[in-house]
Image (tube, grey):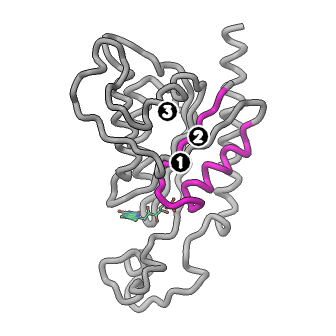
Amino acid sequence: MKVLAISGSPRKGKTTDRVIEEVLKGVEGCETEFIRLAPLKISPCNACLGCVTDNVCKIKDDMVTLREKIVAADAFIIGAPNYFSMLNGITHNFLERFCQFRHQSCRILAGKLGVVVSTGGVQPEIPGQQIETIFSYYQIDHVGTIAVHGAASCFTCGHGEGCDVGAVQMMYGPGTKITDDIIPDLSKQAEKIIEAQELGQLLTKRLAQKVASVA
Ligand SMILES: Cc1cc2nc3c(=O)[nH]c(=O)nc-3n(C[C@H](O)[C@H](O)[C@H](O)COP(=O)(O)O)c2cc1C
């Protein structure tokens, strides 16, 4: 069984990537691949309808190779951060291109399994809700979602303490001094590390059930 993990965070090795890696630790006996979207060139859907006849997008960019991996996968782990109370743009572009999988009653992704990793500085659950919506459009069987607080850039931008529109004051109020202990980090959220690994284990179990049901 193949598990394709996709991170839409532009920040390599930060919260979204790290939570996905923890989910992958719980996945056993499967071929796994972890792809970061940020270095790839993936345009948004341009609504050309070129994919209507054959379910293949006509935009020639990195989604061409990704399409093959998506079709071959038995399960997805898709992670994205919250940008302005929305799914971030890199992930949105990628998910828009799923349009090629749903023409003429085609159900290319139907029955594949999906895990969602959702991160945010203040509201980590929002991008995950949007990924779950995409899963339902494509009849991807949603196994579970994990939402984790990551450090908003306001903690390190240099102006966080005095900025009344930033995450520091939004989370802790005016006059807050930025100290290590108030900066959200996965390493301080032991329960989230366990939850992520358990989600990976659940995905393994669900994949095994799928194999058993077709045998
Ligand atoms: C442009 C931008 C906008 C953001 N907007 C929000 C937001 O509206 N709500 C929120 O909870 N976090 C917001 N964040 C914080 C990120 O979601 C948070 O830092 C998350 O951990 C980023 O994921 P990463 O650690 O994988 O990069 C924003 C971050 C950036 C860079």
User: Is ligand 1 less than 8 Å from the beta carbon at label 3?
Assistant: no
Mark 1, Cα crowd under 10 Å, few <14 / some 14-19 / many 20+, is some
Write down the residue under mark 2. Answer: 5
Viewer-proximal residue among 103 and 215: 103
Mark 2, Cα crowd under 10 Å, few <14 / some 14-19 / many 20+, is many
Position of residue 60 relative to residue 112, above or below, is below
CB atoms of marks 3 and 1 within 8 Å = no
Please give the count of numbered marks on the rendered protein: 3
Write down the residue under mark 3. Answer: 66
What residue is shown at x 41% (from left), y 88% (from top)?
A: 161
185 horizontally vs 90: left or right: right
Q: Residue 157, percent across and down?
A: 43, 80
Quarter of image, ligand 1: bottom left
Is residue 153 in the magenta section?
Answer: no
Looking at marks 3 and 1 on the same chain, the residue that comes earlier in the sequence is marked by 1
Image quadrant where one finds the C terminus: top right
Viewer-proximal residue among 128 and 29: 29
Position of residue 53 relative to residue 184, above or below, is above
Dot label at residue 36 = 1
Look at the numbered disc 3 and give the secondary structure of its residue.
helix
Q: Nearer the viewer, mark 2 or mark 3?
A: 3
Q: Residue 174, percent across and down?
A: 37, 88
Q: Which stretch appears magenta?
A: 2-27
Kind of residue sitting beneath label 3 = Leu
Task: Give how far apart the Cα atoms at labels 1 and 2 are.
Answer: 8 Å
Q: Residue furthest toward the right?
A: 29
Looking at marks 1 and 2 on the same chain, the residue that comes earlier in the sequence is marked by 2
Task: Give the quarter of the image for residue 210.
Answer: top right
User: Is ligand 1 less than 8 Å from the beta carbon at label 2?
Assistant: no
Kind of residue sitting beneath label 2 = Ala
